[in-house]
Amino acid sequence: MSQLFTDKYFPKTIEEFIGNSEIVENALNWAEKWESGIKQKPLLFYGNSGNGKTTLAYLIAKKNDWQIFEMNSSDLRDKENIEKIMGVASQNSTLFSKKRLILIDEIDGLQAQDRGGASAIMTIIKNSNNPIILTANEVYSDKKLVPLRSLAELIEFKKINYLSIAKKLKEIATIENIEFEEDSLKLLGKNSEGDFRGALLDLQSLGKNVTTKDIEGLFARSKKEKIFSIMTKIFKGKTIKEINEAINNSETSSDLLLSWVDENIPRQYEGEDIAKAYEYFSKSDIYNGRIYKRQHYGFLKYVYFLSTVGVGLSKEKVYSGWRPFQFPSLISSLSTNSAKRKVKKEIAKKISKKTHCSEKQAIKDLPLIELYLTEKEKMSDYINYFEFSEEEMAYLLNTKKDTKKVEILFKDAKEKKEQIIIEKMSKHKQTTLF
């Protein structure tokens, strides 16, 4: 696919960094002191996503010719791993005696079950001979970060001013030969809520002509088109704008749409295109995981963009002809299992009622009931005794309710029941006579 603007226009120098100018100056002074041999407390950058925390760390390393050593929360799982890898990096310099910047990204992603991760990081921070920068979205709501807050200098990244974002978008639009209305880029900057990375993705999704009307309708979901039409436009689409408009017009929920995309990648693509598509889809899943762990829904924009536009434009060749779309098998399986659980529960209720036990015990006894059902001559008796339905009997026999086997069983059960009723009536009549 065409290179994402977020990669293409990643700042190459400190001068290209936008927003939070005071923080930039403080970070540069911090780096100068390290270069002079004066050890400094680690910096803990925190604030909303997309405002340059990680970017500034990379630019500082580049300006000072430091090697950067990066780890994130997924790497920080246990004490042994941290001490083995990160501990060595914090003590040693590079081959040319340069400093090594240790970047611990998304420190707030540490989970409660991480085995000694936080304590190991604190030990390394205290003893590090190299500069350390940590990043996080939120530092005050997580108890695990309380000790780290006392060891680092906390620096809050404010939302980037929308006029600064608009100015940079204008520069990029000019370079990319994108036509735009002057107010449209200001509105795009406002809608980004300080997330410059998100604003870049929005600009790229709008194509070669950006109007105020386009911006106003960017996040609206008119929900007009059916799923098959949307899927066709995702997998057959040739531009970001074409695919993005189709998604915005989808009547399908976002989670279901992503399940459709996931299911159909290997059905629509071939060879390396499948691998490339899943690479983008997997990146979107990483952001999904961050949303789940931190409840930070600002990442949703990246999830949808990567899993739809990224997948749609990852193909290298044109796929002609119609390839049928498959309903997500996972959802189908969950639906089937849900129906089976419901039938199983109804069976347990009937067994519980007749045998005077709990439903929980009845479920445990189901294998025993199924064993009894191997006695063909007694099957109809069990149907009558427990009052099983055709669907319930089919479940116990591991078959479908419309099979000949079930039909014959219920016919026999009905005949036996009628015979019992006739016999009871006959006995009652005889008793009455005498």
Image: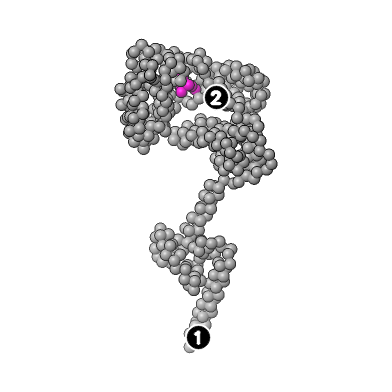
Name the residue carrying label 1: 430
- Quadrant that contains the N terminus: top right
| Amino acid type, mark 2 | Thr
Identify the colour scheme used. Answer: one colour
Judge whether 285 appears above or below 35 on screen.
below
Mark 1 burial class by Cα count in 10 Å: few <14, some 14-19, many 20+? few
Q: Is residue 151 visible?
A: no
| Residue 54 lies in the magenta-colored region | yes
Taking the image as shown, residue 117 lies to the left or right of residue 410, namely left
Within the magenta stretch, is there residue 243?
Answer: no
Q: Which residue is mark 2?
A: 6
Question: Which residue is rendered at x = 51% and y = 30% of the image?
Answer: 298
The structure residue drawn at horizontal position 51% and vertical position 36%, both measured from the top left corner, is 282
Q: Is residue 163 above or below residue 401?
A: above
Could you say which disc has been placed on residue 221 in the image? none
Asked which secondary structure carries label 1, the reply is helix
User: Residue 119 placed where, x, y %?
Assistant: 32, 30
Give the tally of numbered discs. 2
Pair 1/2: label in front: 2
336 left or right of 131 in image: right
Where are the magenta residues, as a range?
A: 51-56
Residue 138, image x and y in percent?
Answer: 42, 28
State yes or no: discs 1 and 2 in contact (Cβ < 8 Å).
no
Label 2 residue SS: helix
User: As shown in the figure, which amino acid type bears the numbered disc 1?
Assistant: Gln
- Please identify the residue farthest to the front as the structure is shown: 95
Residue 85 image point, x, y percent: 36, 29
In the orientation shown, which residue stands out farthest toward the right?
321
Identified at 38% across, 19% down, the residue is: 94
- Identify the mark nearer the N-term, 1 or 2: 2
Outermost residue, bottom side: 434
